[in-house]
Image (cartoon, coloured by chain):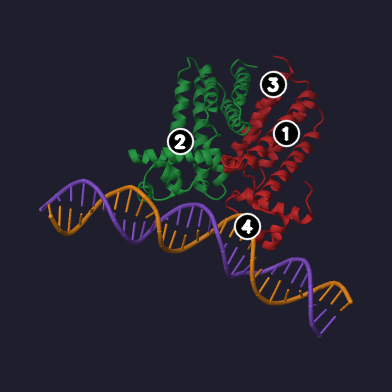
Chain colours: A red, B green, C orange, D purple
Amino acid sequence: MELSPDQRQLVDVADRLFYERGVHAVGMDDLRTAAGVSLKRLYGLFPSKRELLVAVLAQRHEVWMRGLAARVEAAPDPRTRLLAVYDFLADWFAEETFRGCSFINVFGELGGTWPEVVRFARAHKDAFRGYLAGLVAEAGGPGWLAPQLALLAEGAQTTAAISGTTDAAGEARAAAEIILAAALDGR
Amino acid sequence: MELSPDQRQLVDVADRLFYERGVHAVGMDDLRTAAGVSLKRLYGLFPSKRELLVAVLAQRHEVWMRGLAARVEAAPDPRTRLLAVYDFLADWFAEETFRGCSFINVFGELGGTWPEVVRFARAHKDAFRGYLAGLVAEAGGPGWLAPQLALLAEGAQTTAAISGTTDAAGEARAAAEIILAAALDGR
DNA sequence: GGACAGCGAGAACTATCGTTCTCGCGAGTC
DNA sequence: GACTCGCGAGAACGATAGTTCTCGCTGTCC
């Protein structure tokens, strides 16, 4: 879905607040204040908080996948590209505002009562696994490799979020190197 | 903290509801109905919803760690014990009610606004990593092994929750076997 | 047997939520 | 200059949250 500049700006603000505090903890009034628009205008841009959240998730998916791809494609060869995934995570974890994966967080908060959130989270994670599968194919790796590399990335995200440290990125990268060696170098 | 039988029963009910729907989506009235106690009695057992959540998290930690240890200790040798961690996860993921790790979910929902929840989640994950580190030490593995195995377990939990399948447990186990081979068999 | 303490059921209270409505100002048009 | 239209500010509304209070029953002790 294409967003107008005003919608886009509101989505940016909502994304920041939802991510910082959780969806439920952010009221429409908070959004209004933070975005500097009237409540009427806010409801003109999105008909409800749910629709706004959907737009937030859609944009976050796009931005995240683009950021990942940019980091990955800067690497010279297939194997390095796979490892670049974890370098991307390391940069992300080091951001001041990092608080885990939005989709995991939102799944925890709303997944039990709002099936659409589950669908979004699932689609996001499927896309990530699919992207990894493409990189693995380029590297000539076996079909089981991408899911294992994905697990390391997922584990690193929750671990970094909860521990509040960036260590998990390096640990995941090291583990990935071992698995890559086993998968690509034979043995 | 020791709980009375009545507190214990309420904690069981609250745990089930919080886990199914998320903390915020469960009202005190829902708890009252589900537990079959009066509101007055409920507030006699725990002074607030927050204290009740704390008790829920504390109990879930205990139960989960005990369940893990039981599965692990049934395995005959150190290496098999490490792999039993993923068999424990497989059983858990297959439960009808599985919806991910409570601590990850609650972190996503409340971690941004309630520091105590962050502390609990961190303590739980630290305890898990510490337990793994003990198993790794028994197996004579290097210090970097336990964190990597933990990442696989964490990744499997979120992946199983969001995907709604149990595949992640087997994938994590297979990855763990590769890493174990590299760590324990040299090379 | 009567007073009283304890407790269950649920109304009441206060706050806050998402959403809608009202009001009034300011710009654009003939 | 009057009329209108659009929009910002924020009050209002209905629902629901967490928590407390009221009331009436029951069971117990002197």
Q: Earlier in the sequence, mark 1 or mark 4?
A: 4
Q: Amino acid at mark 2?
A: Arg
Disc 1/disc 2 C-alpha distance (Å)? 32 Å
Task: Estimate how packed mark 3 is, as few (under 14), some (14 to 19) or many (20 or more) residues with alpha carbons within 10 Å.
Answer: some
Disc 1/disc 3 C-alpha distance (Å)? 16 Å
Q: Position of residue A96 (x, y in %)?
A: 65, 48
* Left or right side of B82 for A126: right
Query: Residue A144 bears which disc, if any?
Result: 3
Query: Residue A28 bears which disc, if any?
Result: 4
Q: Is residue B37 above or below residue B125?
A: below
Q: Amino acid at mark 4?
A: Met
Disc 2/disc 3 C-alpha distance (Å)? 33 Å
Query: Residue B60 bears which disc, if any?
Result: 2
Disc 1/disc 4 C-alpha distance (Å)? 31 Å
* Quadrant of the frame with the N terminus of chain B: top left
* Left or right side of B143 for A58: right
Q: Identify the residue under disc 1.
A: A127
Disc 4/disc 3 C-alpha distance (Å)? 45 Å
Whether discs 1 and 2 lie on one chain: the answer is: no
Q: Quadrant of residue A82?
A: top right
Task: Estimate how packed mark 1 is, as few (under 14), some (14 to 19) or many (20 or more) residues with alpha carbons within 10 Å.
Answer: some
Q: Earlier in the sequence, mark 4 or mark 3?
A: 4
Res B70 seen here: yes
* Left or right side of A149 for B126: left
Q: Amino acid at mark 3?
A: Trp
Q: Position of residue A11 (x, y in %)?
A: 71, 52
